[in-house]
Image: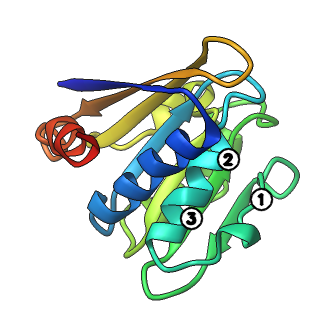
Amino acid sequence: MSFVFVSQSEADTRRLGLALGKLLPDGAVVALNGPLGAGKTRLVQAVAEARGLDPHEVVSPTFTLIQEYRGPRPVYHFDAYRLRDDDEFLNLGPDEYFFGTGVTLVEWAERVAACMPTDFLEITIEPLDLTSRRIKIEAHGGEFQDFPSLLASAMA
């Protein structure tokens, strides 16, 4: 099951991220894919905002590999861009986050696809032009099969 959303602006992407942040259950894992500048971190900022965190504190974790945003509903933000292989990702201890109480978002998840849990959401962002994005949300595993239709309803 999947849902495709066409964002015409950063405001649209924020609106999608806010809906995601409200709907994602604790323990959810989200794989974020797309080229540099696609808007992955912008989406994470909106998810964090919806979960009661300050979106201005959310930055790309490219040089730290993981950022932990603690609060009433924590967000864990990985970046696999600079990792050489799956072992390097596994050394970060992702299972502690994947099966924890927060939401885990992994940018450049396609680089560590074999390390993703059985149940996760995959979000692929495709730039259409300078401001527009095609954002596809796809469920993997049984736990999130209904999530794309729930998100579609929330965005209607």
Q: Is residue 96 visible?
A: no
Judge the density around disc 2: few (<14), some (14-19), many (≥20) Cα neighbours within 10 Å.
some
At label 2, which amino acid type do we have?
Thr
Q: Which comes sooner in the sequence, label 3 or label 2? A: 2
Q: Which comes sooner in the sequence, label 3 or label 1? A: 1
Residue 76 circle label: 3
Q: Which comes sooner in the sequence, label 2 or label 1? A: 2
* As drawn, 78 above or below 40: below
Left or right, residue 60 beside residue 111: right
At label 3, which amino acid type do we have?
Tyr
Cα distance between the residues tagged 3 and 2: 12 Å
Check the image and tell me how it is coloured: rainbow
Kindly identify the residue that appears in the image at 68 percent across and 28 percent down.
38
Cα distance between the residues tagged 2 and 1: 7 Å
> Mark 2 = which residue?
41
Quarter of the rendering containing residue 4:
top left
**Residue 92: image x %, image y %?**
66, 57
- 3 or 2: mark nearer the eye: 2
Kindly identify the residue that appears in the image at 70 percent across and 59 percent down.
66
**Residue 72: image x %, image y %?**
44, 88
Q: Quadrant of the C terminus?
A: top left
What secondary structure is marked by label 2? helix
> Mark 1 = which residue?
59
What secondary structure is marked by label 3? strand
Cα distance between the residues tagged 3 and 1: 12 Å
Q: Are marks 2 and 1 in contact (CB under 8 Å)?
A: yes
At label 1, which amino acid type do we have?
Val
**Residue 81: image x %, image y %?**
75, 34
Depth check: give the residue in front, 134 or 68. Answer: 134
Q: Is residue 61 visible?
A: yes
Left or right, residue 23 beside residue 130: left
